[in-house]
């Protein structure tokens, strides 16, 4: 290769370009001679170059004596104990981000004393102790240092305060702990400080200290989110006059927000969400005329938001407000005039659990291009106004759930782009309108719990991007349309608590990505098809309870290794329980391939009857492992394989025709919290291993043919309700009153010697019995009068009698059936 005029080359860029990555597997090793001859080269950029044979890379670079800037970002290099770059001490800028450096590399870097810019993010191959950063404190010329995502752990070195030339310090996404060193507040030139996503703690008052005058003037970005800071916001925070971005989200900060917030006049980004702030939001917020993005969600604010809170927010584009939507508390009220015209034009509006009702807020119609709108749980009690259609079609995300919105969705379009629509828990009526089929890019449709009726439009099959469909808890009827089987991206299908009938369309077997299938509480009549287990391999939540399914449980269901919830309760299912339930890996190990099987999305929900209660699982779905086959005609024995489901939290096999004994290995189900085997024909003793189930809090073995002594000890000591074992005549021992054969009889107690009564005793007894009759009569009359004149007492008394009588009659009825 003839280099000629390349010897004077000063800048060489071999890195990523718009055409893609540059593959240079043999670049270094095959062209060392000409590469090393670039003696005038000052800047070398090889970012995102795949260098597989890089053993001589640093030796080659060492020959570039004029090099001042080196970029090896994301080259897939494994840098271990690199040679000393004797001739590269002139390096001013170095980027080794997204490679794999070891501790020796960090020590080598500390010798580059002229270094001004050090970029070393995403070197996750190793875990570093923060003490390895101490040599960096000698790099007095450093202006910028980025060490994000490196698994640094320990305290932030105090000596970093010696780097007085620093303008940017980024230590985010590590495992630093303790407080922020006070020395940091002495870095006069610092403009950017990012310590977010660590394990830092303590009070910000102590951590930030009193900023130097120069720092309070220069600091422009402060990010401390995703840590464990506590206490109130320090007064010195409001001294950073030129602060442009302030992020404190997801800590444990508390107390009120001071009126001094208005002093931060340069703020364009403010996020104090997910803390414990309380009190009212100061009206000085409305003075932040440069504010573009505001998040103060997930706190405990209360009071009134007025027009003054927004008076000068002309640049606001993202508004995130709520009191505490985690608890669905509407403690913040937006009180503005009906003809109020806001000074802003918002693109994103997040106002869950803010009282904006009862009417639809009129000021929304002034917002021309809103891409996201969340006014869930906002106390709106109104029909959707006509003008809302103009807003609707610019939105990519709409959440108006948990309100009292009435009427029909009468909007009509030929085409739309809306991506997510959540209108659940309202009072919408009418049919599901076909204009929804025109939303080509719709990925989520949630109209759960309304008053919709009619059939599902067959044109829903056109919604090829749809991933989440929830039409549950309405008055829909007819057959499930086979067109739903063409929704290849569907991962969640909720049609529960409607009036669907007929069988399952075989086209549903095409939904290969399906995670949740909830068809419970309908009138479906069919056998459980084997293709569910054969084709829906991703299924994790299967709920068919309260339908009319019949026939055996197909053994193919056991192919569903990811299954977490299997609910077939209250159908007409017969036959035995398949023996291969131990193939349910998620129930056996709690994970699939050693990892968590499910990252629950906020929108996902499953309702399960557990411990006699109907519970709703949402973000805690990953912890739910449940099998409910109750209320069927299942026969045979309980398979031993079921006992290997160690991660199972709920097992309900009640109200069937199961026979045989309770497996002795039931103690292997170590995570079980609720166990119901009642109303079967199980026989034999209760296994002693049942007492080793430490998490068991609900147990029902009633109305079987069990016999022998009830086990005691450990967790069973807390389950002392006799109704757990009632209807098993052969059982004995605590907590039943029936003693077991061979139990120690009560020791003989000597009766006291008869004592002769004196005349005084006879006189006392005479007056006692004389007074007993009238006293009982007066008390009885008093109770009758109270019941006669006190309505609430009378109602409670007879209600109690009614409940008691019903329990007695129910017990007699059950006994006769046995």
Image (cartoon, rainbow, N blue to C red):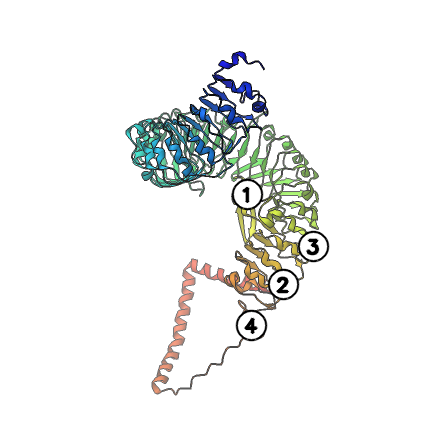
Mark 1 and mark 4 lie on one chain; the one further toward the N terminus is 1
Distance between the alpha carbons at the discs numbered 1 and 2: 34 Å
Element on which disc 2 rests: loop
The image shows residue 305, relative to residue 773, as above or below, that is above
Q: Are marks 1 and 2 in contact (CB under 8 Å)?
A: no
Q: Is residue 571 left or right of residue 257?
A: right
Quadrant including the C terminus? bottom right
Element on which disc 4 rests: loop
Residue 335's x, y, as percent? 38, 33
Q: In which quarter of the view is residue 771 placed?
A: bottom left
Q: In which quarter of the view is residue 364 placed?
A: top left
Distance between the alpha carbons at the discs numbered 1 and 4: 47 Å
Q: Residue 704 — which label? A: 2
Q: Is residue 178 left or right of residue 642?
A: left
Q: Are marks 2 and 3 in contact (CB under 8 Å)?
A: no
Q: Are marks 3 and 4 in contact (CB under 8 Å)?
A: no
Q: Residue 739 — which label? A: 4
**Image point (49%, 60%), residue name:** 799
Q: Nearer the viewer, mark 2 or mark 3?
A: 3
Q: Which residue is mark 3?
A: 576
Mark 4 and mark 2 lie on one chain; the one further toward the N terminus is 2
Residue 553's x, y, as percent? 69, 50
The image shows residue 94, relative to residue 506, as above or below, that is above
Q: Are marks 3 and 1 in contact (CB under 8 Å)?
A: no
Q: Quick one: label 4, few (<14), some, or many (20+) residues within 10 Å?
A: some
Q: Are marks 1 and 4 in contact (CB under 8 Å)?
A: no
Task: Kindly tell me whether residue 322 is visible in this rendering.
Answer: no
């Amino acid at each position: 290769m003839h280099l000629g005029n390349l010897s004077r080359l000063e800048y060489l860029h071999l890195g990523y370009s718009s055409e893609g990555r540059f593959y240079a597997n043999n670049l270094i090793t095959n062209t060392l001679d000409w590469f090393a001859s670039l003696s005038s080269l000052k800047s070398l950029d090889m970012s995102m170059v795949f260098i597989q044979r890089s053993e001589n890379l640093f030796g080659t670079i060492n020959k570039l004596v004029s090099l001042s800037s080196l970029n090896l970002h994301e080259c897939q290099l494994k840098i271990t104990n690199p040679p000393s770059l004797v001739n590269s001490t002139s390096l001013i800028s170095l980027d080794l981000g997204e490679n794999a450096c070891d501790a020796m590399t960090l020590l080598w870097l500390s010798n580059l004393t002229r270094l001004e810019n050090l970029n070393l993010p995403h070197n996750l191959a190793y875990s570093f102790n923060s003490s390895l950063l101490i040599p960096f404190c000698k790099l007095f010329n450093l202006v910028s240092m980025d060490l994000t995502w490196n698994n640094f752990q320990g305290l932030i070195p105090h000596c970093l305060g010696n780097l007085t030339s620093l303008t940017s310090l980024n230590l985010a996404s590590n495992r630093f702990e303790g407080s922020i060193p006070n020395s940091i507040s002495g870095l006069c030139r610092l403009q950017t400080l990012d310590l977010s996503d660590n394990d830092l703690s303590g009070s910000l008052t102590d951590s930030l200290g009193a900023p130097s005058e120069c720092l309070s003037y220069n600091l422009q970005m402060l990010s401390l989110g995703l840590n464990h800071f506590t206490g109130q916001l320090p007064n010195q925070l409001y001294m950073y006059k030129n602060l442009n971005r302030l992020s404190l989200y997801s800590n444990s900060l508390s107390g009120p927000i001071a009126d001094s917030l208005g002093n931060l006049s340069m703020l364009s980004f403010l996020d104090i969400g997910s803390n414990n702030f309380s009190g009212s939001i100061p009206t000085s917020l409305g003075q932040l005329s440069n504010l573009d993005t505001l998040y103060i969600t997930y706190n405990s604010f209360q009071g009134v938001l007025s027009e003054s809170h927004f008076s000068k927010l002309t640049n606001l584009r993202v508004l995130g407000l709520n009191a505490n939507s985690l608890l669905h508390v509407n403690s913040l009220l937006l009180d503005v005039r009906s003809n109020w015209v806001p000074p802003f034009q918002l693109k994103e509006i997040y106002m869950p659990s803010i009282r904006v009702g009862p009417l639809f807020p009129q000021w929304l119609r002034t917002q021309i291009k809103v891409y996201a709108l969340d006014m869930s749980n906002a106390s709106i009690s109104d029909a959707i106004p006509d003008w809302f259609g103009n807003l609707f079609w610019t939105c990519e995300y709409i959440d108006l759930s948990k309100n009292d919105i009435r009427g029909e969705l009468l909007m009509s379009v030929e085409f739309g782009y809306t991506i997510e629509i959540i209108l659940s828990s309202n009072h919408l009526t009418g049919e599901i309108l076909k204009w929804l089929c025109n939303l080509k890019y719709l990925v989520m449709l949630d109209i759960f719990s309304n008053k919709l009726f009619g059939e599902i439009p067959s044109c829903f099959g056109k919604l090829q991007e749809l991933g989440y469909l929830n039409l549950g808890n309405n008055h829909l009827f007819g057959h499930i349309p086979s067109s739903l089987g063409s929704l290849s991206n569907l991962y969640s299908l909720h049609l529960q608590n409607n009036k669907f009938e007929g069988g399952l369309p075989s086209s549903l077997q095409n939904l290969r990505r399906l995670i949740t299938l909830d068809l419970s509480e309908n009138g479906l009549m069919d056998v459980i098809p084997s293709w569910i287990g054969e084709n829906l391999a991703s299924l994790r939540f299967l709920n068919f309870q309260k339908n009319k399914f019949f026939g055996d449980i197909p053994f193919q269901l056991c192919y569903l290794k990811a299954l977490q919830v299997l609910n077939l309760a209250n159908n007409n299912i017969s036959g035995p329980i398949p023996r291969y339930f131990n193939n349910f890996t998620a129930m056996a190990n709690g994970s699939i391939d050693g990892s968590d099987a499910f990252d629950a999305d906020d929108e996902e929900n499953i309702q399960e009857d557990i411990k006699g209660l109907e519970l709703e699982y949402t973000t805690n779905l990953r912890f739910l492992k449940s099998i409910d086959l109750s209320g069927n005609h299942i026969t045979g024995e309980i398979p031993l394989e079921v006992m290997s489901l160690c991660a199972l939290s709920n097992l309900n096999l009640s109200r069937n025709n199961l026979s045989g004994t309770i497996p002795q290995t039931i103690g292997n189900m170590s995570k079980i919290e609720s166990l119901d085997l009642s109303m079967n024909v199980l026989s034999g003793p209760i296994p002693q291993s049942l007492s080793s189930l430490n998490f068991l809090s609900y147990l029902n073995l009633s109305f079987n043919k069990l016999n022998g002594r009830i086990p005691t000890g450990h967790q069973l000591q807390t389950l002392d309700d006799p109704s757990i074992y009632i209807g098993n005549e052969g059982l004995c021992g605590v907590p039943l009153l029936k003693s077991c054969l061979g139990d120690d009889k009560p020791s003989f107690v000597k009766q006291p010697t008869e004592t002769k009564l004196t005349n005084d005793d006879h006189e006392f007894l005479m007056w006692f019995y004389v007074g007993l009759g009238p006293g009982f009569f007066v008390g009885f009359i008093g109770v009758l009068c109270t019941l006669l004149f006190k309505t609430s007492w009378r109602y409670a008394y007879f209600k109690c009698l009614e409940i008691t009588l019903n329990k007695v009659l129910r017990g007699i009825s059950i006994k006769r059936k046995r």
